[in-house]
Amino acid sequence: MNDERISIASPQLGAAERDRIDSVIDSGIIADGPEVRGFEREFADYCGADHGVATSNGTTALHAALHALKIGSGDRVLTTPFTFIATANAVAFTGAEVGFVDIDPQTYNIDPDALESRLRDGEEVDAVIAVHLYGLPADITRLVELAETYDFALVEDAAQAHGAEVEGKRVGSFGDAACFSFYPTKNMTTSEGGIITTNRVDVAERAARFVDHGRVSGYEHAEVGHNFRMTSIAAAIGRIQLERLPGFTRARQANAAALSEYLTDAPVTTPYTPPDRTHVFHQYTVQCDSVDRDALKSYLDAKGISTGVYYPKPVHKQPAYEHLSVSAPVAEEAAERVLSLPIHPELSEADIERIGRAVTDYAEVVT
């Protein structure tokens, strides 16, 4: 058996990306320019959205999207506490107040029933950010209905869900705005980068100004903005990666199916996918049932298998947000039990077998 270490992530970059970068360098336009506009159009089309606004990373995409939706001081935004802290930070950057809604124990995404209960009780909400965690869409159909009923803006944090679908429709096309990240470990990358997709022309125009110093044209600036622009080099990588994304997705899904087979009798709960949704497995996250998560993680590490805990502490337990009064017992329990196993496209059949057998064998070691 190959004893080479199995990584938790492996960006897939090759000759096509290098050639595209060379062509951009040769053009002399290496900052914002035609290459970025091309990427914006192509990625929006891929998602089934009308507009795309590229940004420097996923966090700036969230910040700009909220700004474009006119979220600011005096507003309240609800999201999940079981996510990377950037989701909440983007709200804080606008001056709005952030609140947290507990998660569904099977999908790890925001629980629409818990959200609806709070809305019925009269909680005032100006926006909700629904995170499509690990590559599995949130219950966006319910959330769209709630947004229409209770009149709040809906933002999709799709940083981990490139190509994921709900009833055959891709994420990035449901909310008032959606935000993606292209960090190197994501399902596709631009090295660093992000994008906003939206069907609202007013949101697209306001976001595009905000990420470019509030610029209207030339040296005319209609508002105070940031420099959140994507570079042409990043966009060049992204255009090739977007072409390769369907293949990446098929590989992740095949790896997930094979790994679930190996883990049928393992002491873990494998990922759940509701019948109306398509999972793209940014992470393959199990929940440890009768075994200690941290002990299993150490065991796999000793076997040369890298793992990750996403996330060991819910956002409301972080020092930056622990002053808030939050009840999220499901998220807190998940944080103690989840473990993500390698699932990236570079894995071989032998790698998948090695991971599956190691997890299964651990149960015998501790009994």
Image (cartoon, helix red, strand yellow):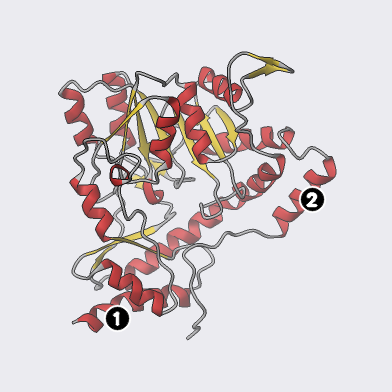
- In the displayed structure, 188 sits above or below 229; it is below
At label 2, counting other C-alpha atoms closer than 10 Å, the crowd grade (few under 14, some 14-19, many 20 or more) is: few
Q: Residue at x 52, y 63 (%)?
A: 345
Q: Position of residue 124 (x, y in %)?
A: 25, 20
Residue at the image position 60 percent from the left and 53 percent from the top: 244
At label 2, the amino acid type is Asp
Residue 125 lies in quadrant? top left
Question: Is 47 positioned to the left or the right of 361 in the image?
Answer: right
Q: Residue at x 29, y 48 (%)?
A: 108
User: Which type of secondary structure does the marked residue at label 1 adopt?
Assistant: helix
Q: Quadrant of the C terminus?
A: bottom left
Rendered position, 155 above or below 252: above
Inter-mark Cα distance, 2 to 1: 48 Å
Which residue position is annotated with label 1?
361
- Where residue 23 appears, x then y in whole percent? 80, 47
Q: Badge 1: few (under 14), some or many (20 or more) residues near its Cα, within 10 Å?
A: few
Q: Which residue is mark 2?
A: 22
SS at mark 2?
helix
Check the image and report above or below for 156 versus 336. Answer: above
Residue 220 circle label: none
* In contact (CB < 8 Å): disc 2 and disc 1: no
- Residue nearest the observer in this picture, 347 or 327: 327
Taking the image as shown, residue 226 lies to the left or right of residue 295, namely: right
| Residue 196, x across and y down, in percent | 52, 32
Residue 263 visible (yes or no): no
Give the residue type at disc 1.
Answer: Asp
User: Which residue in the rendered view is the most extreme toward the bottom?
Assistant: 1
Q: Percent x, y for residue 136?
A: 37, 48
Point 44% across, 77% down: residue = 304
For marks 2 and 1 on the same chain, the one whose residue lies earlier in the sequence: 2
On screen, residue 222 above or below 234: above
